[in-house]
Amino acid sequence: MIESERHKQRVTEIVTRWCRNTKVEPYLRVYDIPGLVSSIMDEFYHVQLCCGHLVNSIDEGVDLEMDNDDGGVSCGCYCKDCAEEYKKEGAREV
């Protein structure tokens, strides 16, 4: 699993547990906890890759190029897990 996704899940669990223990959960809207978790994650993971996953720096991404259906070529920077999946589908590392 992607590091940022693992940490996001863990932070969500911690914040949710804290809200239950402090008894503020009934006063929260549906999007309050996800919004808070997103703000926390933005402090630690600054770069969003083409696959939508977050990393600390662009160096953690893998540059790929893929052929489009219209004959063109698309390029992008993907996390290691997504890059492996795209390579199976014919993408090339640059």
Image: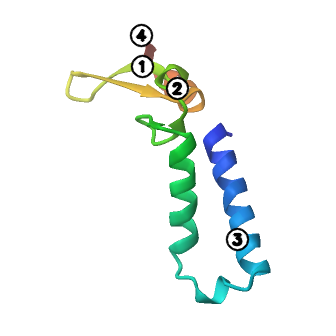
> Which amino acid type is marked by label 1?
Leu
Asked if residue 32 is positioned above or below residue 69 in the image, the reply reads below
Outermost residue on the top side: it is 94
Q: Residues within 10 Å of mark 1 (few under 14, many from 20)?
A: some
Which tag, 2 or 1, sits closer to the chain's start? 1
Q: Give the label, 3 or 4, closer to the camera.
A: 3
Residue, disc 3: 16
C-alpha distance separating marks 3 and 2: 32 Å
- Residue positioned 45% across, 42% down in the render: 52
Label 4: which secondary element: loop
C-alpha distance separating marks 2 and 1: 7 Å
Asked if residue 85 is positioned above or below residue 19 in the image, the reply reads above
Mark sitting on residue 94 = 4
> Which amino acid type is marked by label 3?
Thr
- Residue positioned 53% across, 45% down in the render: 43
Nearest the camera: 91 or 4?
A: 4
Asked if residue 48 is positioned above or below residue 58 in the image, the reply reads below
Q: Are marks 3 and 4 in contact (CB under 8 Å)?
A: no
C-alpha distance separating marks 2 and 4: 11 Å
Q: Are marks 2 and 1 in contact (CB under 8 Å)?
A: yes
